[in-house]
């Protein structure tokens, strides 16, 4: 139906109004490729699982384990994500990967700095405890955030803890932490330096020299 009416003084427009409203159309889903669908169906293996009482965690149905070698299932990653989402009900979906939890980074840094202050005061056991706390916070970063940031934070904290273990003359723990740093950031010379010092403490001079050589191969200008 078409009619005219005034909108403002001296202004007149002609409109066409329709009383019938079109129903929204459902999006057309593409037809799945039959070959690809057959491959997916071929690899599909049903998993027997059960839920926790709060429905937030999954376990193998037969043994009630989060990780079960007998049933060949591992729900650790899934349960961690579920717990994060359950603890943040306002988070309807994971944010983009470039979003970083600044508060978590601040807590990691402040806890690490507490450890550094204790280390400088030769309170090595207390420093180790703060570095351990900082590492626990670093690995709690949501899985959808950039993995590189977590690796940098964690490797720095573990490297500092290796130094604290060395000063406490716990050379085995110092070596274990140094090896962990190398696994996380192999091309960072600091991890190899920590390993070398731990090996020196264990009187393994040849292995210590090799650790230094390997570290310098990644950063030859690092003195």
Image: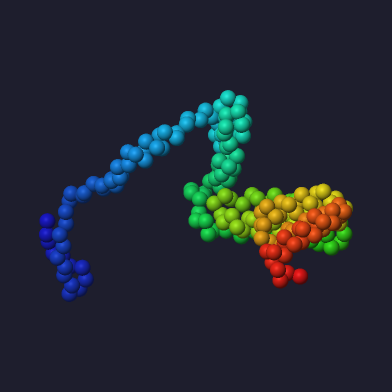
Q: Is residue 124 something that shows in the picture? A: no
Q: Residue at x 50, y 56 (%)?
A: 96
Instruction: Judge left or right: residue 22 versus residue 79.
Output: left
Pick whichever, 84 or 175, lies toward us: 175
* Quarter residue 134 falls in: bottom right
Asked which quadrant contains residue 159, the reply is bottom right
Q: Of residues 175 and 207, which is closer to you in this image?
A: 207
What residue appears at the point 75 percent right and 54 percent down from the top-left corner? 178
Most extreme residue toward the front, as rendered?
206
Residue at the image point whose x is 50% and y is 50% from the top: 94
Residue 58 % position (x, y): 56, 34
**Residue 180 drawn at (x, y percent):** 71, 51
Say whether residue 102 is left or right of residue 123.
left
Decide if residue 73 is on the left or right side of residue 20: right
Pick the quarter of the image with the C terminus. Answer: bottom right
Based on the displayed image, in which of its 4 quarters is residue 12 positioned?
A: bottom left
Q: Position of residue 193 (x, y in %)?
A: 77, 60
Residue 203 versus residue 89: which sits nearer the camera? 203
Name the residue at the bottom extreme: 10
Q: Where is residue 105 in the image (x, y as percent from the top left)?
A: 65, 59
Q: Quadrant of the N terminus?
A: bottom left
Counting the numbered discs, the total is 0
- The image's colour scheme reads rainbow
């Amino acid at each position: 139906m078409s009619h005219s009416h005034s909108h403002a003084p001296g202004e007149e427009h002609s409109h066409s109004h329709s009383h019938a409203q079109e129903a929204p159309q459902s999006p057309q889903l593409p037809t799945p490729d039959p070959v690809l669908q057959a491959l997916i169906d071929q690899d599909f293996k049903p998993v027997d699982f059960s839920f926790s009482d709060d429905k937030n965690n999954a376990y193998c149905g037969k043994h009630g384990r989060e990780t079960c070698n007998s049933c060949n299932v591992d729900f650790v990653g899934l349960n961690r994500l579920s717990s994060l989402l359950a603890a943040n009900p306002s988070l309807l979906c994971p944010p983009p990967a470039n979003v970083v939890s600044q508060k978590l980074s601040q807590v990691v840094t402040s806890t690490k700095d507490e450890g550094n202050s204790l280390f400088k005061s030769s309170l090595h056991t207390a420093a180790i405890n703060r570095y351990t706390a900082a590492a626990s916070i670093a690995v709690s970063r949501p899985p959808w955030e950039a993995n590189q940031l977590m690796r940098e934070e964690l490797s720095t904290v573990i490297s500092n803890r290796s130094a604290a273990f060395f000063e406490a003359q716990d050379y085995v723990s110092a070596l274990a932490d140094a090896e962990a740093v190398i696994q996380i950031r192999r091309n960072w010379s600091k991890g190899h330096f920590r390993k070398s010092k731990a090996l020196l403490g264990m009187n393994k001079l040849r292995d210590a020299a090799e650790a230094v050589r390997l570290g310098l191969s990644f950063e030859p200008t690092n003195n």
